[in-house]
Structures are given as structure tokens and as C-alpha cells.
Amino acid sequence: MICETIIKTILLHFILHAVLTECHLKDLGEITKNWSNVLNNLEKRIIGGTNTTKYEHPFAVQFFNHGGLCGGSILTRKTMLTAAHCFDHNKNIAEMKIFSNPRFLFDLQSIIHEVWQFEIHQNYSKEMFFSNDIAIIIIHDYFEFGPQVQKVTIIDTDVWMNINNTFVAIGWGENKYGTGFKNNNFKKVDLYYVTRERCKTENRIDLSPEMFCLSGDGETDTCRGDSGGGVLWNGALVGIISHGRGCAQAPGIYVNVYYYRTWINETVKKIYKEFCDFHNHKALK
Ligand SMILES: *[C@@H]1O[C@H](CO)[C@@H](O)[C@H](O)[C@H]1NC(C)=O
Ligand SMILES: *[C@@H]1O[C@H](CO)[C@@H](O)[C@H](O)[C@H]1NC(C)=O
Ligand SMILES: *[C@@H]1O[C@H](CO)[C@@H](O)[C@H](O)[C@H]1NC(C)=O
Ligand SMILES: *[C@@H]1O[C@H](CO)[C@@H](O)[C@H](O)[C@H]1NC(C)=O
Ligand SMILES: *[C@@H]1O[C@H](CO)[C@@H](O)[C@H](O)[C@H]1NC(C)=O
């Protein structure tokens, strides 16, 4: 679990990637097209097992921030969603990289993207420790969509918040707390909905309204390095992996993306506009 804000330092020598700075306003609005009726399409995902592939979860990306590892989910051809705490230890864009089609951790055959700008929620960690743990990144170039790189579908309802539901969290993080990040494969884990009351009691904390809790079977969980990555229900994104007390100790805490649907929508538009304005193309009306 993403028990810790500072993630184990990894020293990497990145290959610099050519930077494209064209501004295509047609990408705007992509995020809103599949908000509706997602449930109709989504009853056929496989749940179970441990290894997964980019073909199964093509929206998942790795976000390296100055030695820290986080996950993320592609929103549009230029933007991705992650956790705000992934920026706690570094805000220098030159030290950030996104890997868009990694088969495993440190896959240097990945497509490597430069970060152009990021937007952390204005009230991140203000009302409460880790509250509003959400951020959006815009990249210089584009995510080239194909079988292993696609945008995510965000849930358009909150009916999934029910103790009878099973979720899938994905990531490249630690397999066990403290084991480190060597050659981690892309993993998925089944998690179960935990009521707010049980979550508060077991974590001995209060929860802000956008937080929800999931638990593994006692031996499985999300762990360090998974932060920022996605939690799915019926194939649609419902949560961002946020934090917890240890891994597989107490229910983990996740960010409800449905709660932020308007913020996500507006922030994507805002950073596209900044990108376009910066590159001196016509601004949005
Ligand atoms: C919306 O999702 C459906 C089903 O996944 C897909 O076939 C379609 O291309 C998507 N539409 C857009 C505009 O991306
Ligand atoms: C997952 O993949 C790794 C590496 O390919 C393999 O060693 C391991 O046995 C796989 N685990 C499962 C449960 O299939
Ligand atoms: C942050 O909190 C302030 C004060 O409660 C509120 O007015 C503002 O709308 C919040 N910002 C966002 C983006 O929710
Ligand atoms: C969970 O499922 C059980 C058995 O089907 C049912 O009785 C219960 O009402 C369900 N709980 C919720 C919160 O939907
Ligand atoms: C997102 O923005 C578009 C365009 O402004 C709007 O039509 C849509 O309703 C918004 N969706 C949400 C969930 O806020």
C-alpha cells in the first residue's frame, strides 16, 4: 500500500525522448465522451489471478518522479490522472517521466514522455491528512493509442460503493512491504469494499468525504509504488490508490474519482488551455 509518502529512491538514467509541442484542441472533450452509459459495456472483465498485462489495462502508466514511483491512468491523449502525494518530495518537472507502455518496471523499451505541467488539487492535505489526493499531468507529446495504450473509462455513478462488490487494483509496486522494486511485474489484486465505519475504526483516523476504503483477503493489498494508479469496478475507473497503514494491515484508503468528475473535467480543460496558450495557438473560447 502506499503507506508512505516518500517512496523508495530509485536511480535511473533516462533516455531523453523527442519533444513535440504542437497543440491540438481537438483532443479537448475526449474525457467527457465516455462518461455516460459505461455500465452497459462493462460486464465482461475477468477478476482473479495476479499477473496482468497492458493489453488488459492499457490506460495504466508509470510515473517516475525523482526516484519515486507512482501509477497513473490516461485520461486523454495528453493527460493522465495520479495522486497528489506523488509530488510531495519533488515538484521539479525536469525530474519527472511517464512510461506509457511498460511491460514491467524499468522497461526501457517503454515510450517515455516528458511532463509539461501538473495540477495538484488546491486543497490537497488541507482539511485532513491526505485529503484531496488527486492530480493531473499534461505531457509534452502524445500518448500513442493502440492495443497497449488507451484512455481509461471513468465511472459515471456511485452505485459501486457497496460491501458486496469486488474491485481490481493494478500497479507495479512492491509485492510485499519493504521488498523493494526489483523487476516488478504488472500486477492486479482483488479488493473488497469496506464500510466507512470499519475503515475509521481499523485505521484509527477520520475520513474525508472523497475517501473510500478497500481491503484484500488479509495477504493481498496495494503497496508502495502503486500510489496514483487505478482501482476498477467492472472495467471502469472508480478510484485512485492513495494511502494506508502498512500493506495488508488495515483497509487501504482510495480516492473516489466520481466525487471529482467535475474537477477532473475542468482541470483537464484548464491545463490544455495553458498548454495551447503557451504555444501561442488560439485559446479556447
Ligand atoms: C467509448 O467506449 C466504447 C466502448 O469501450 C468504444 O468503442 C468507443 O470507441 C469509445 N468512444 C470514444 C469517443 O472514445
Ligand atoms: C507472474 O509472472 C512471473 C514472471 O513472468 C512468473 O515468474 C510468475 O510465476 C507469474 N505468477 C503467476 C501467479 O502467474
Ligand atoms: C478549497 O477549499 C476552499 C475553502 O473551503 C473552497 O472555497 C474551494 O472551493 C476549495 N477548492 C476546490 C478546488 O475544491
Ligand atoms: C449484499 O448481499 C446480500 C446477499 O445477497 C444482501 O442481503 C445484502 O442486502 C447486500 N448488501 C448491500 C449493501 O447491498
Ligand atoms: C464536462 O465538460 C463538458 C463540456 O464543458 C460538459 O458537457 C460535461 O457535462 C462535463 N461533464 C462533467 C461530468 O462535469
Image (tube, rainbow, N blue to C red):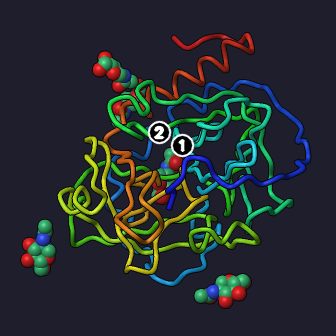
Disc with the residue nearer the chain's start (1 vs 2): 1
Q: Which mark is residue 134?
A: 2
Horizontal and vertical percent position of residue 177: 56, 69
Distance Cα–Cα, label 1 vs label 2: 7 Å
Horizontal and vertical percent position of residue 35: 38, 45
Identify residue type, mark 2: Ile
Query: Is residue 93 shown left or right of residue 192?
Result: right
Query: Is residue 264 shown left or right of residue 22?
Result: left
Q: Which mark is residue 142?
A: none
Residue 109 vs 270, above or below: the answer is: below
Horizontal and vertical percent position of residue 153: 46, 52
Q: Residue 81 carries which label?
A: 1
Return the residue found at the far front.
Answer: 204
Residue at point 39%, 48% (across, down):
255
Residue 30 vs 109, above or below: the answer is: above
Query: Is residue 217 shown left or right of residue 67?
Result: left
Residue at point 51%, 11% (across, down):
285
Identify residue type, mark 1: Leu
Residue at point 81%, 63% (across, down):
107
